[in-house]
Amino acid sequence: MPEAKELQYADIHRDVVRSIVETGPKYYITLGTAIFVTLLCFFFPWFYQLYYGIGAAGLNHPQVWGTYLASFIFWIGLSHSGTLLSCVLHLTNSSWRKAMYRSAEAMTLFSLVVAFTFVMVHLGRPWFIHWSLPYPNQMEMWPNFRSPLLFDVMAITTYLTGSAIFIYMGSIPDFAAVRDRTIGWRNTMYTLLSLGWRGTDREWHRLHWAYTFLAVLIIPLAVSVHSIVSWDFALSIVPALHQTIFAPYFVVGAIYSGTAGIVTVMFILRKYMDFGQYITKVHFDNLGKLLLVLSLIWTYINMVELFTGWYSGASTEHEALQYKLFGYYAPLYWEMILFCAVAPLLCISKRFRTSFVPMLILSIAVNIGMYTERFLIVGTSLSRQYLPDAWGLYVPSLVELSIILGSFALFSTFFLIFVKIFPSVSMYEVKETMSTPKTEPEAPPEGNPA
Amino acid sequence: MTNFAAGIFHGPESALAAAGTLKGAGYTTPELMSPVPIEGVEEVLGEKKSVIKTFTLMGGILGGTFGFLLAAGTAVLYLHPTGGRPIITIPPFLIITYEMTILFGILFTVLGFFISARLPVIRERVYLPESAVDKFVVTVACADDEHFKRAEAILRDAGAEQVREVTEEA
Amino acid sequence: MSILDRIADGWRKYRKPGYYDEFDYHWGMTVDLDRCTGCEACVTACQSENNLPIVGEKAFAEGREVKWIRIERYWEGEFPDVKLRFIPMLCQHCDSAPCETVCPVSATYHNQDGLNTQVYNRCIGTRSCAVYCPYEVRYFNFYDHHWDSPLDQQLNPDVTVREKGVMEKCTFCIQRIRQAKDVAKDDGRRRVRDGEVQPACVQTCPTQALVFGDRKDPESQVSKLMNNPRTYRVLDELNTDSSVVYLKKVEDDHA
């Protein structure tokens, strides 16, 4: 097919299948590096910590949570845009979703897995983590369903199940399409994954409804997940954590950092997977607008949080506030304000939104800022609690920093494997956005793709 | 063993028209295979109803009941007074109920999808790989050669590029 | 009784927040700050009674010491007109304990004696209870601790040695309470007598600033002290309903 023509169905098919089956040395080098870094920076320090005890981290009394919990919230937060955004855009029929949602959903899934590993890293005795699951056992013990942490267990299990099912359901037709183009072990794998999908009118109809119902169920689920994560903090009576605004604050923060994460992933997919024709300026433009709105809401909630703390007049609240704004961790606080509240204002300009590299830099800056935010929530609040005798400082240790770095490598490993198994651009939905082939083959379609 | 006539079309409109004609000519309801969902299938081949929404609803109700009973029941099975709260504490248990409602809703939706879409299948069925790329295929079951010829004519009239005879093992 | 009645009965029973009324004992402690000299004898006694690890200088500097009871020191005023104040701080065994509700595996709960207990074997080390505790009296085992010989000879056989990754805190010397109850049972008594059981800190206190006893017994020393007009609870505004009551220091304004 001549290159000058509009994108045809077959082109998409060819491009996506190519992205799966054609693997260059660059990919293997990247994957190898990612796995190596994961082992070296994530698993090695973690095993050391398992052997040595949590003391390998910089934690102390009263700072018993530290970066592990901050990383946990960060990764849960990063998971909050993919599936949620995809569901919202599916229900509102936004066609610009279609080229990017698959990888965004994968981001959700893998962020959740990484967040789960942080729970394991965080626990003092992770080998007993199954005790937090409700299953009949010889001890006749059940978990404590009154605990906010158990809400977490239930919510994250549900969310992981839900988003895994959602991404899988959406991929069934694409698995079937790839199945016909592959041979060998890939063919076997896709035959199994596609469950015998044929693309009949009946199947499409059922898929549409099932997918819509799932989307309807997942939106309230995603909102509840991050609210529940916020309740790990807000249901305590620690000054500056015991805040009613925490649930919406966390949900907005999560969607915010997740959207920034999507921008980063889109940039990388576009650049290294040759999806330039599918992931376009339109996507960056829309995501930029979303980032702008979210940053404004986020800033607003931050101000409300400060205001209510100040207005309460309670000495503990004032101390916590004072410490947050001007204490030991204050430089981090102002860095967060710069990255998350000020920098995204650049998105007002359309020229900024549609330029790829500046958007990439912004998205990374936002996520650095959001990581800082999570760190500060844990860090500043725990160092200034009620009894001044128990005030304390905390600086992360090398083990913690290495595990944070390693978690990004772990995420990249998952993602790199994902792009070779899942069609990372949804073929059938991109096809839907294009004009259908005309009855006469010689008349090229006039419509504009996407 | 069933024989099928499969017409391969270039666009959805002609395929849909062919399917409509076949249905009008007294054939069993033809099946459309397409790379994308086709709009307007229901007007031609009749309205579709699926059991998925019933499944979702039942799953939600079941999950909600299960969630509350799980939380309240296990709390009663092994009494662990904590924090001066009553053994059955409503607000925290409602959160468990909420999560379980959604979990079961999702799982039952998937179950409903599998049952109503008749997936997964192990046996080979009529399938043309072209339909996953950019072709629209109409298949219809034909009892004998005469039926097949008539179907072929209808398909060709509607603008099929190609008509094939496909056999499906029973 | 029909099944419905039984469910309704159970519902009423388990929906009652005053579940604690049925407790056998309600152990409590009073701390008389007028008597406390800040000598830290209680800290040492607790250390040896409860097999608290000696963490060493490095871990202490890192803030990882384990002290089930600690003496908080607060300075008031500017030099040279300064006052030093002590508050012994130990687990307050709150009746509405924030730490209990947060534990996902019920490793900490209220037992039938009104004690806030910590089950080491059940603990998975989420450390959330330490965050939720406003008194900061929960201590985490950041390492496996070991006792150099011959220190290991002095370990109390009645108390577990905790492994790494487990939270621990003051138990009101539950092993001694247990023993006193056994003795009372052997003697054919229904209840433990007042003063029969004392935690290590109370036993050691040279000025008898700490008093321990059953709050359910109106004649016990601790119950009487709790009616003293000097009583207050630390962070009472948080409604933790703690079992440790402090007696305010009597001060002469001209001192």
Image (tube, rainbow, N blue to C red):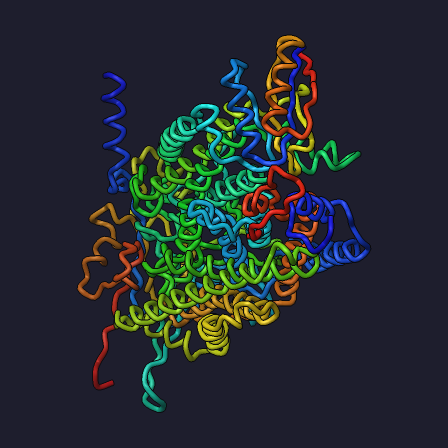
Kindly tell me whether residue A124 is visible in this rendering.
no
Q: Nearer the viewer, residue A434 or A257?
A: A434
Write the residue at 60% across / 50% down: A103
Kindly tell me whether residue A361 is visible in this rendering.
yes
What is the x, y in percent for residue A374? 48, 64
Q: Nearer the viewer, residue C112 or A239?
A: A239
What is the x, y in percent for residue C136? 42, 62
Q: Is residue A184 left or right of residue A411?
A: right
Residue A174 vertical placement versus A29 (above, below): above
Residue A56 vertical placement versus A320 (above, below): above
Write the residue at 62% across / 48% down: A425
Residue A137 vertical placement versus A121 (above, below): above
Most extreme residue toward the bottom is C80
Q: How many marks?
A: 0
What is the x, y in percent for residue A25? 82, 55
Write the residue at 43% across / 45% down: A91
Q: Nearer the viewer, residue A255 or C91?
A: A255
Most extreme residue toward the right is A25
Residue C225 lies in quadrant: bottom left
Residue A123 vertical placement versus A238 (above, below): above
Residue C130 lies in quadrant: bottom left
What is the x, y in percent for residue A78? 53, 56
Q: Is residue B122 left or right of residue A129?
A: right
Q: Is residue B157 left or right of residue C233?
A: right
